[in-house]
Image (spheres, grey):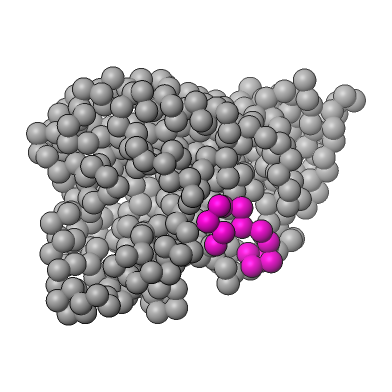
Amino acid sequence: MSRYLLKNATIVNEGKKFAGDVLIVGERIEKIGSGLSDATAAVIDLSGKILIPGMIDDQVHFREPGLTYKADIFTESRAAVAGGITSFMEMPNTKPTTTSQKLLQEKYYIGGNSSLANYSFFMGATNDNLEEVLRTNPETVCGIKIFMGSSTGNMLVDNEKTLTGIFSKSNMLIATHCEDEMTVRKNLEAAKEKYGDQIPPEMHPVIRNEEACYLSSSLAVSLAKKYDTRLHILHISTAKETALFDNSIPLEKKKITAEACIHHLWFCDEDYKTKGNWIKWNPAVKSKTDRAGIWAAINENRIDILATDHAPHTVEEKKQNYSSAPSGGPLVQHAVLAILEKVKEGLITLEKAVEKMAHAPAICFRIKERGFIREGYFADLVIVDPGASFSVIDNPILSKCGWSPFDDVTFSHSIHTTFVNGKPVYSNGKIIEQSSGKRLLFSPQN
């Protein structure tokens, strides 16, 4: 059984920052304190470094099965642990889509054999698989995903009867992508009339506008309130939507929660002029005002979680014209560093950033024994070096797609070491362990 003693760290955990030591025995944190010693442990001196719980990313697209020319669970979990993400929850819009219990279990088999990070996979809803959805086990699956807007394959759920059935009968967390399909189609047709086949990328937030997002998000909230459903709305992109969420009660008691993603917090619509399709996501990156509104909602606890929506595509795909280029981009390798940069800029405290990246996902999804630096919990830990900068262009891109929207950025911090289940899986720029991830387990929702 491996033993590691992390000495002299600046520990950031549960709203506090303090100097201390952490003893890891096997997969778990054995002891937290000061002046700890263990003659049998490998000692790592963390003087000048920061120790945080690993990020739990509740929204990624790792493309396996069926789209593995873009990415796969092995390659993207490598990128994730290199970026300080120790657990992920992956979306069902693969090929085939994960819309049956059989296909869901096949994905878990792949994860168990190849993931360096801990993993869970969403069960996907369609207009015609309600019975399959309701068979999902809430103790072993993170949630049900509903695309209330256009998506891969047949995963758009726009049938009122189906939506009512899922919201009224599910005993699980429902995660939604919210964009009103009819509004998006109307705006796209208007753009085609004006530009033909040469729609500029700057039109993306006009096509997928505030109205499309708010109509769909407010519908999801109204359904959740009507049926007392556990709802989690993904990737909020507008300031207007943030008013839908409450901060008057603790997260563990909330029935309706929300997430913000790195790209909506970093970029704005002015960046389309230089970044073009490289920052084309759904929902779209919008205005500076929207970005500021999302930051305010995070700090005021109306938005609960920070995530990536990591969704890689090949360089060739993204180089196509706007209408043909797919939406999405790789983010897991640089997400924690991007948030730490915003800490340095004063947009969020380090304690709040750790809360939103690690504690809140664990609470929101009721993940067992992860997301905190606590004795007895799994040792999913990240050592951050605030004295070593990280230039994206000068370091390997570990996502299979081989590019990053941050290719022109040098971050002021770097990820020194990532532990997953007590094992160092990434250290000093190298992946050093294989298939260390475990399936996430959950306490059922009320």
Where, quadrant-wise, is the C terminus in this rendering? Answer: top left
Q: Which of 132/26 is in front? A: 132
Q: Residue at (48%, 51%) from the top-left corner?
A: 70
Left or right position of 324 against 265: left
Task: Tell me where residue 286 appears, x and y as whole percent.
Answer: 33, 67
In the rendered image, residue 401 lying in the magenta stretch gets the answer yes
Magenta segment boundaries in residue numbering: 391-403
Q: Residue at (74%, 40%) from the top-left corner?
A: 432
How many labels were placed on the picture?
0
In the rendered image, residue 225 lying in the magenta stretch gets the answer no
Dominant SS type (magenta): loop
Tell me if residue 148 comes above or below residue 445 in the rendering. below
Residue 113 can be seen, yes or no? yes
Task: Tell me where residue 257 appears, x and y as whole percent.
Answer: 32, 41
Task: Tell me where residue 127 appears, x and y as whole percent.
Answer: 17, 36
Q: Residue at (44%, 30%) from the top-left corner?
A: 107
Where, quadrant-wise, is the N terminus in this rendering? Answer: top right
Left or right position of 126 against 292: left
Tell me if residue 142 comes above or below residue 157 in the rendering. above
Q: Residue at (34%, 47%) from the top-left corner?
A: 234
Tell me if residue 354 comes above or below residue 371 in the rendering. below
Q: Which of 150/255 is in front? A: 150
